[in-house]
Image: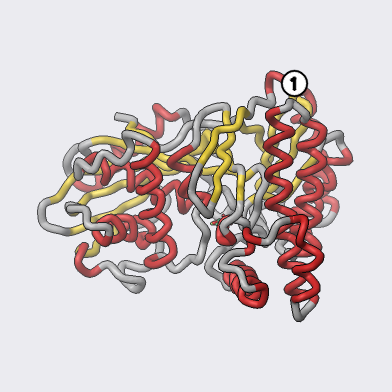
Amino acid sequence: MSERTPGEVVESVRTGFAERYGHEPDGVWSAPGRVNLIGEHTDYNGGLCLPIALPHRTYAAASRRDDGLLRMASAQQDGVVEVALDEVSPEQPGGWGSYVAGVLWALREEGHDVPGLDVFVDSTVPVGAGLSSSAALECSVGAAVSDLAGLGLLADAGGRARLAQACIRAENEIAGAPTGGMDQSAALLSDEATALLLDCRSWQTEQVPFDLASAGYALLVTDTHAHHELVDGQYGSRRDSCEEAAGILGVDLLREVPASELDAALEKLTTDELRRRVKHIVTEIDRVEHAVAALRGGDLDEVGRLFDASHVSMRDDYEISCEELDVATETARQHGALGARMTGGGFGGSCIAIVRTESVGEVSRAIDAAFAERGLTAPSSFPVTAAGSARRDT
Ligand code: GAF
């Protein structure tokens, strides 16, 4: 986990830019990673989710070019990747550059006049940890393009929502990851000390107060360091199952199945697997509504119970957990967490737990010990608070 301050990363990204390109950047923009409090795999079903933005951010130093060329470099990658904006496609430039180039491509597809760019990025969001490093990259670049092309998309929630949609298209259509939009929305629309209640059917948002510290609690994130890769087929196969089930049930999106009609819907499905997948989605959307009510009512015990129920649903019905996530969440509970659940796409990545502030060290050490006992790679645990969204830094 990087301990660099935002000011240090802004400085280092400016220096890295100047070293690569031989001139100063026009500015530096940044966007956060996220953890989702609850509402997993609901976004592509038009459902509800409740992410917070992390203090960890990706920073993009950028300057305009007038020749339609995009050049990209990163503190975390070797070399400079180049592509002409007219040639951006799912094959070009490929690799990490697709997440950058895809954003410029998508904004052009939306009819915006987007110039070429020199970009240098650096990040404090752990990569492959399920903390949304891809969306942080897309949205930091999207913020830079919006300002440098004079699009004004950062000025209000409507513009930010349009920029989020462009970043979602970049990820789906150029980077080839069939994700659902929660992460880009979190990176662009979150506020400090609040969680973002996101309705992924209407794309309406509401801010829900999220300040565990004043109640004596902390949100502990554990990066299990277990493999997490969204383009490896498992995520897509869950999405396919949901679309298949929606087809059988005669709805466009599983969001249209109310929790009160779940049993009747399950009877219509043809396989146990489809029944389990639908059960997770319908109950998870319901849990988001209850979690929002519990947070608004200051009932953290209930939020913890909902975290636990969500984890069980993802482990047993959606089948996206793994040994590391189960061990970390179970250990956190045994050491007094009000609740714990995996967060993000699953199959590795991170989990979250609500723990008493004074127990953060004890719970982290207990998780380390449980991993060591089982011969699992050592995890990293760290408390987080809800941070702000994409912005211009200099
Ligand atoms: C990943 C995806 F990118 C999101 O769209 C969402 O589906 C999430 O997994 C699961 O809730 O982060």
User: Residue 214 location, x and y as percent?
Assistant: 69, 19
User: Residue 342 location, x and y as percent?
Assistant: 71, 50
Task: Decide if residue 17 is in sight here.
Answer: no
- How are the residues colored? secondary structure
Task: Decide if residue 19 is in sight here.
Answer: yes
The image shows residue 63, relative to residue 88, as above or below, that is above
User: Residue 99 location, x and y as percent?
Assistant: 38, 58
Determine the residue located farthest toward the right in the rendered image: 334
**Tag count in the figure?**
1
Determine the residue located farthest toward the bottom in the rendered image: 270
Q: Is mark 1 within 8 Å of ligand 1?
A: no
Q: Is residue 380 left or right of residue 261?
A: left
User: Residue 54 location, x and y as percent?
Assistant: 54, 37
Determine the residue located farthest toward the left in the rendered image: 66
Quarter in which the C terminus is drawn: top left
Quarter in which the N terminus is drawn: top right
Circle 1: is it few (<14), some (14-19), or many (20+) Cα within 10 Å?
few
Check disc 1 and report its element: helix, strand or loop: loop
At label 1, the amino acid type is Gly
Give ligand 1's quarter of the image: bottom right
Determine the image quadrant of residue 71.
bottom left
The image shows residue 56, relative to residue 174, as above or below, that is above
Residue drawn 40% across the image and 29% down it:
8
Determine the residue located farthest toward the top in the rendered image: 214
Residue drawn 30% across the image and 41% down it:
153
Determine the image quadrant of residue 14.
top left
- Comparing 272 with 376, the one in front is 272
For disc 1, the marked residue is: 216
- Comparing 47 with 379, the one in front is 47
- Comparing 256 with 185, the one in front is 256
Determine the image quadrant of residue 258.
bottom right
Residue drawn 52% across the image and 31% down it:
387
